[in-house]
Amino acid sequence: MAKGLASVVAGSSVLFFASALPHPTPIGTAKALPVYHPAEYLAEVKVGGHKYALMIDTGSSDTWFVKDGFQCLLYPHCNLGPVFRGDFPGGLIEVEHLNISYGGDIGAFLNGQMGYSDLTVAGVTIPKQQIALATIGSYTGDGISSGILGLGLPALTGSFRGQIPTEDGLQNLAPYSPLITTLTNQIGKHTFSLGLSRNESESFLAFGGVPQHVKVGNYTRVPIEKMAKPFGGEDYFYYALTPDAMVWGNSSGGGVNRRAGLPQVIVDSGTTLNVFPHDIARSINGHYAPPAVYSKSLNGWFVACNAVPPSLGVQIGGQMFWTDPLSMVLPQVTDPETGYCATGIGATDGSVFILGDVFMQGLVAVFDVGQRMEMRFAKRLG
């Protein structure tokens, strides 16, 4: 959901896997290539006879490309990658337009055109998938990716009827079948898996199962939780869950904190940081040695780049997942005034808290969007 590093419910019953159950062989698998030294992950996507790198994002549902002639607002340059030239190979949807914003990247929004194209990712071709071409907006890119590969659910799509974005609302929202829904219906296997790693050769995105060579420990499984709709009722918007508990403390084992009764979080590969409530984020950042320092201007915590990070565990479905200490300090993002490195923990006052790449690195996450509507997690071995 929140893009890059510029920014950063009710409980439910839980089932637990007692053993490492095998998953089906995937229909297609692709490398998830890290850029910015695993701050985000990209996949190669082919459309209109050309190949583009798109950010893999489980926290949004629209797949979009930056269009030739894109108008960047608020910034001198939005720093997006190679542009999409020409029109939609499968035709323009004249009566709809794209209107999306990203919560973590302050002020980030995009408007553009909606249309159709055959699209190939991980060796699987999806015919006449609805996609978007961004024509105007404010966005902080990485200079490599040309847009976003949205792997989220239908309720989160950002297509609207008409051509006036300033008048958009629920009354003209035009939901459609996003890529993951179209693709899983096509292959008849309603799962995809994501394995993010600090090692480029080990990261993957797979549709229909988990690559057989990937070795993991025990899987835990939890339902994807619904979230409140703006005017009553609930729906599946994000890959949301409620952790059992979190544990953090000094790496030496001192000052251990345990927090239960946690709020709902979303699993979002499009956000680098773990984004928690302020009190939890302050406490975790205070357990670095030396402690992290909050930067008001950069809206985040920074720490000496050789600092010792705290231990951090997130308990899901009865199983504790410990974060790799190397993921807790981000040397690729520094405070220009102090030279300090960003920590892997951010905070928000909003209602959406995030388990981002910092959490996902070293795990295999399986998203089942069929009848089960559940997520499965296991620690990567070897």
Image: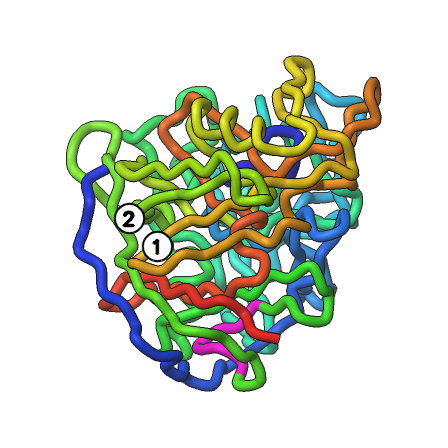
The quarter of the displayed image where residue 256 is located: top left
Q: Are marks 2 and 1 in contact (CB under 8 Å)?
A: no
At label 1, which amino acid type do we have?
Ile
Density class for disc 1 (Cα within 10 Å; few <14, some 14-19, many ≥20) is many
Q: What residue did someone put label 1 on?
A: 316
Image: 269 above or below 163: below
Q: Which residues are magenta?
A: 205-211
How many numbered discs sit on the rendered protein? Answer: 2
Please name whichever residue, 351 or 26, is drawn nearer the observer in this view of the structure. 351
Q: Is residue 172 visible?
A: yes
Question: Residue 303 location in percent, x, y?
Answer: 71, 29
Which one is earlier in the sequence, the residue at label 2 or at label 1? 2
Q: Is residue 244 left or right of residue 145?
A: left
The quarter of the displayed image where residue 74 is located: top right
Question: Residue 147 location in percent, x, y?
Answer: 65, 47
State the residue at coordinates (58%, 84%): 213
State the residue at coordinates (64%, 14%): 296
Q: Is residue 96 visible?
A: no
Q: What residue did someone put label 2 on?
A: 236
